[in-house]
Image: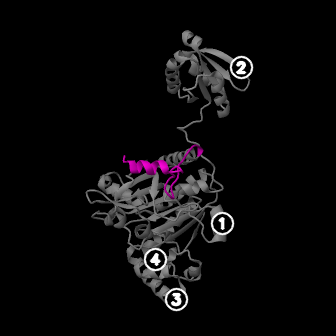
Amino acid sequence: MTSHSQGKRSSRKEPLLPPKGTRDLVGNEYLNYQGFAEKAAEIALYYGFKPVETPILEHEEVFTSGLSSATDIVGKEMYTLRTKGSDRLALRPEGTAPLVRAYLSEGMQALPQPVMAYYYGPYFRHDNPQRGRYREFRQFGLEVMGSPKSIYDALIVRLCVTILGEAGIKNPCVEVNSLGCKECREGYRRELSSYYRKHAKEVCAECRERLKSNPLRVLDCKNPKCAPIKESAPESIAYLCTECKKHFKEFMEYLDEMDVTYRINGSLVRGLDYYSRTVFEIISGDSAEEGAESGSALALGGGGRYDYLARALGSKKDVPAMGASLGVDRILLSPSYTPLHPRIIKKPEIFFIQLGFDAKLRSFQVTEILRKARIPIAHSLGKDSLGTQLGIAEKMDVPYCIILGQKEVIDGTVIVRTMANRSQDTVKLEKLPEYLKHLKR
């Protein structure tokens, strides 16, 4: 390090903070995310989904191949970089395209179809940070690849609603629509373009630009100025072909049978180009009420069918598929969210106290005995004083302490103290797990 850089480092008065739009997850906040991910994965596994994880970095064309430059993700929000070998990479802004890329590159076409996968992890978009919107955000996703059947559309929606229900989000508002297939959608696109051109002077500049490059995206506009025009715009379901009408009707019949409450939103298109036929969004009751007042309700999740994305990513034929993602950050910020505690990480109920060097040496044997018995503990091995260690145990509000001193090391025992009444027993080390399990009943 040069003296110049040392000078710069030493002159810094404030500690470095995470980059704008990112956060550290510490303590209970981390546990909340971990607990949600575990519960969502458990539900997905019960329904036959298997875990898949893709790289955080992908080739940029994974996203640009299926999305036009007029899409916000490609045009404004992707983080991209060029490697020393001149490869263009991108931090993944969404999860569906990488899953399709993995489906093709890992030979999943040869597996029994459909392939049903779930995933969880961080995603990145250069968005304007605000409540519920981060530049690094976390999503839980579900994908069914290899079947055109409408029952999978309904299954994905049902699982999203179930996962949200387990997280305390009751009576979510599910909005559904159908964009049709690539044949019948062209007629709708022409009709929508014609309608908006007649009102070009009444809509915002962004809508006028979208009208030239990607007409369906005008329906994504949140500008209050454009709301009256959007409300009277043609709806895609009026232009569906016979097969698309049948698919959408079956989808809604399955939702009815599954007791999923929903409503048709004729202006729902979602923000990604690759969607076809079914699209949906889920808004919590709290967010819907807030959005009604502010005009900016945030979706907790959503998705749709993407039957043509695989061909855009290099497949020789279309792979019909349906998927969705849940915005974990937004779910955890919901007023009705109920924390889900992780199973792997348990709050210790026992504090281990050691006194003297011989006890420190024996400490690892004690903690390993308890680990094998699946009994988590807390400790402060760097402390020597009994009073100091008892004080830490009291602050942590643990119900029991294990005390190992010089005499206990010689005798092969430990003292187990109940913190509530200060009663204690001397227990042989080999019988400690059985004693603790009986004590906590």
**Which is nearer the N-term, disc 4 or disc 3?**
3
Residue 119 vertical placement versus 251 (above, below): above
Q: Secondary structure at mark 2?
A: loop
Q: Residue at x 50, y 55 (%)?
A: 22
Residue 336 in the figure: left or right of residue 181: right
Q: Amino acid at mark 3?
A: Lys
Residue 123 visible in the shown view: yes
Residue 63, position in %: x, y? 37, 64
The answer to whether the residues at label 1 and label 2 have Cβ atoms under 8 Å apart is no
In 3D space, how far apart are the residues under numbered discs 2 and 3 (Cα atoms)?
A: 81 Å
* Percent position of residue 366, x then y: 53, 21
How far apart are the two marked residues, 2 and 4, measured between alpha carbons?
71 Å
Q: Mark 4 against mark 3, which lies toward the viewer?
A: 3
Q: Amino acid at mark 2?
A: Ser
* Residue 16 falls inside the magenta stretch: yes
Give amino acid for label 4. Leu
Q: Which residue is mark 2?
A: 423
Q: Is residue 106 above or below residue 422?
A: below
| Type of amino acid at the residue the image marks with label 1 | Glu
